Amino acid sequence: MSHPTLTPTLTPALTITPTPAPALTLTLTPAPALTLTPAPAPALTPALAPPAPPIETAPAAPPSFWQRRIIQPILAQLTQGVTPDRLAMSFAIGTTCALFPFFGCTTLLSLGVGWALRLNQPLIQIINQLLTPVQLSLILIYVRLGEGLWQTTGHHFTVTEMLHVFREASVSDFFQRFGRAGVHAFSAWLLTAPVIVGVIYATTRPFLQRAQLPPRA
């Protein structure tokens, strides 16, 4: 008995072709720019208060007679003459008046001359008080100088004796004894006064001007 012949049949091979996956494309879209626009602030309208009513001030009272004739002139005398030139002149005039060779007259003389020339009264009166001893010591010198001008002699006295007679005797007795000596002393003082004023003014004025200059930086 014959067996059938087996003929192998070849089945074609299964071919798997991989399909490439589509490429993944990421597209980034830029975000829109954020623009901040500040909102305008509301306008502030200040509330205006109603205007205050004007304050009515009473008119200033006119200065009294006492203020016009006493207070204001005294204040003017105390505050005037403070420039270097006026202070130098106050030194000069104050010294010259303080050496006036008569008792009890220098204060009134200084006051009158300072008022007429508009000088510094406090400075003049201080000089007048400080130079009282000098005035007493110069009386006899003025008397002797006056005797030379008048070409006379015969006044032999001391300042102590003159002061004693001035305090104890009457005015007529004092002038009867020392009247001629007073004329001689006054003549000498009147002759030397311009020299004293010129020397003191020329000496003190540069120092006062220099003292008033502002300091240099």
Image (cartoon, grey):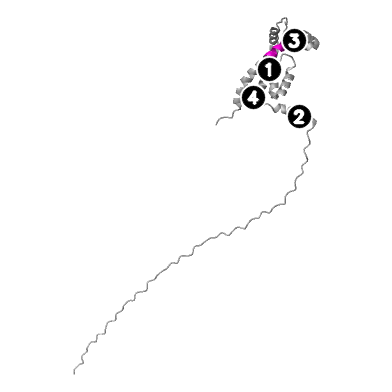
Q: Which one is nearer the viewer's eye here, 152 or 135? A: 152
Asked whether, in this view, residue 64 is left or right of residue 138, the answer is right
Q: Indicate the secondary structure of the residue bearing disc 1.
A: helix
Vertical relation: 156 (above or below) 17: above
Task: Report which quarter residue 137 is drawn in.
Answer: top right
N-terminal of the two: label 1 or label 3?
1
**Is 183 covered by the magenta stretch?**
yes
The answer to whether residue 196 of the structure is visible from this angle is yes
Vertical relation: 37 (above or below) 185: below
N-terminal of the two: label 2 or label 1?
2
- Name the residue carrying label 3: 162
Q: Which one is nearer the viewer's eye here, 6 or 19? A: 19
Vertical relation: 211 (above or below) 152: below
Camera-side mark, 2 or 1: 1
Dot 2 and dot 3 residues touching (CB under 8 Å): no
N-terminal of the two: label 3 or label 4?
4
Q: Indicate the secondary structure of the residue bearing disc 3.
A: helix
- Name the residue carrying label 2: 71
Q: CA distance from mark 2 to mark 4?
A: 26 Å
**Is 150 covered by the magenta stretch?**
no
N-terminal of the two: label 1 or label 4?
4
Q: Residues in magenta?
A: 178-191
Residue appearing at x 71%, y 27% in the figure: 78
- Name the residue carrying label 1: 96
Q: CA distance from mark 2 to mark 3?
A: 38 Å
Q: Which mark is residue 85?
A: 4
Camera-side mark, 2 or 4: 4
Q: Crowding at label 4, few (<14), some or many (≥20) Cα neighbours within 10 Å?
A: some
Q: CA distance from mark 1 to mark 4?
A: 17 Å
Task: Report which quarter residue 161 is drawn in.
Answer: top right
